Image: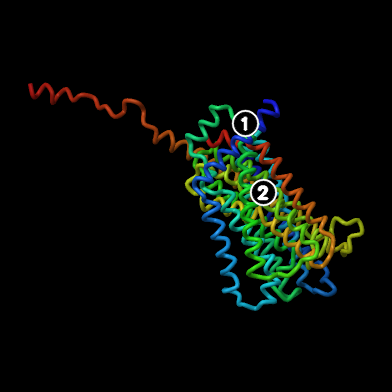
Amino acid sequence: MRKRSLIVINLLAVLAIGTGFTFAVLAPSERTQGDFAKIMFVHVPSAWLAFLAFGVTLVGGVVWLVKKSPLADRIAASSAEVGVFFTGLALVTGMIWGYPVWGTFWDWGDARMMSTAIMFFVYVGYLALRRSIPDPETRARRSAVLGIIAFVQVPLVYFSVTLFRTLHQGTTVVRPDAPIDPEFLRALMINLGAFTLVYLAFTGWRTRLARMEDELEEAEAVSDFEIAGSGITAPRLGEVTGDV
Amino acid sequence: MNGQTFWRQVKEIARKDLLIEGRAGEALFITIPFGAVALMLIPLAIGTDKPLLAQVGPGMFLAVALLFGMLVAFRQTAADSTPQRELLTLLGTDPAAQFVGRMATSTLLLLVFEAVLAPVTIILYNPGRIPGWPWLLLVMFLLALGLSLVGTLAGSVTAGLRTRNTLTPLLVAPLSMPLLLASAQVVEALREEASILLWIALLATMNLAIAVIGVLTARPLEESSR
């Protein structure tokens, strides 16, 4: 992505976050939870964007395995990093909301919380794997495979609220009879759009940085490379003639 | 390559791994006793409240099976050195056959591991009779299969890395958690005499998904370890 496009996305993201924040403040308070429910304007988009980010990592991995495109690997890796950030944000905001509403930061019986934490660590492992492999091609190949395996967690997290008995509320927004106030839903959707722009900006800049890192690595590898015969120095003819 | 050659290769790889394990005894003589010691340590840590221990016994068995089963799945004796990998490549061994063969050995060893630890758990924790307990045999098999699949796959992903010993558990533990969750839910459902079909289906689906990914990605992973 070009630098100018990234700057435009950045500006749009800042503008959208501002709009999202305004709509979040103006949205009606929830009947039983009061203003605590407004943390959902950060929590829900973070969780959705984490799913999207890991989906992009999966697609990037598959594309790399098929086409061996370095760009696909960079996008996959950048998206995983941003996905880990959003997963962490979803977990933290969930815990902050859980304390006043459920009476606890962490509930062992909550399948969504547990499975999200597991997903977080799976992708932390993905990032750790990338850091462990210096060779770019081996790194891309192995992380592509791990990115595919890791994605198995995403449907598990999504369906955890229907599979397990859990405290977490079930599917709400995508239900046809969504029990949600239209004003609240509008603010949620605006925030989802804003977070998507933030995701695009983060991933775009990170991918760009990854390309620069690759170029630097390549340049360093070339400068470290000794040319055959470089160990032999030219004969110092002056000294030789002086001795004679 | 026809199916017959593939399965012959699987058998040979499994036989080779079993021979190496038989000589080294890493899983049978080190990890299994270590798992039994872990089962003994837990009551010392949480107290000797007998009803509590009976309640947590099956869960402790599953947790120890998962944590120590990981050690079985990516044991050192299952890690080929570079010359070994190159020899297998030169012999024209199908990477998918290597994956299936290695996974079969790990499953067998994990089943032995579970078969030894299950009576130890019953003796130490006295969990009582769980209604429909024969289903647990199927769960133990699916857990062993799942762990060996994840372990073998993670072993291939980290093959030849300097950080292999520390990185592999980080990859295997979270990926295996759905297996642990589903297995624990089966125990709970059996205790409550509820349906366990959903959990068995979840375990089987997870195993199938990882097996398919493992077979499909065996070649690219093999190429990256050269």
Query: Callout 2: helix, strand or loop?
Result: helix
User: Compared with residue B87, is residue A162 higher up or lower down, i.e. above or below?
Assistant: below
Q: Residue furthest left?
A: A244
Q: Is residue A219 visible?
A: yes
Q: Which residue carries the number 1 mark?
A: B94
Q: Is residue A35 left or right of residue A62?
A: right
Residue B192 % position (x, y): 82, 67
Residue B2 position by quadrant: top right
Residue A101 % position (x, y): 76, 74
Q: Which residue carries the number 2 mark?
A: A150
Q: Is residue A202 left or right of residue A49?
A: left
Query: Callout 1: helix, strand or loop?
Result: loop
- Disc 2 sits on a residue from what chain? A
Residue B109 % position (x, y): 61, 49
Are discs 1 and 2 less than 8 Å apart at CB? Answer: no
Between residue A191 and residue B134, name the one nearer to us.
Answer: B134
At label 1, the amino acid type is Asp
Q: Is residue A216 left or right of residue B150?
A: left
Q: Is residue B11 left or right of residue B183?
A: left
Between residue B179 and residue B15, name the one nearer to us.
Answer: B15
At label 2, the amino acid type is Ala
Quadrant (top left, top right, bottom left, bottom right) of the C terminus of chain A:
top left
What residue is shown at x 67% (from left), y 48% (from top)?
Answer: A150
Residue A67 position by quadrant: top right
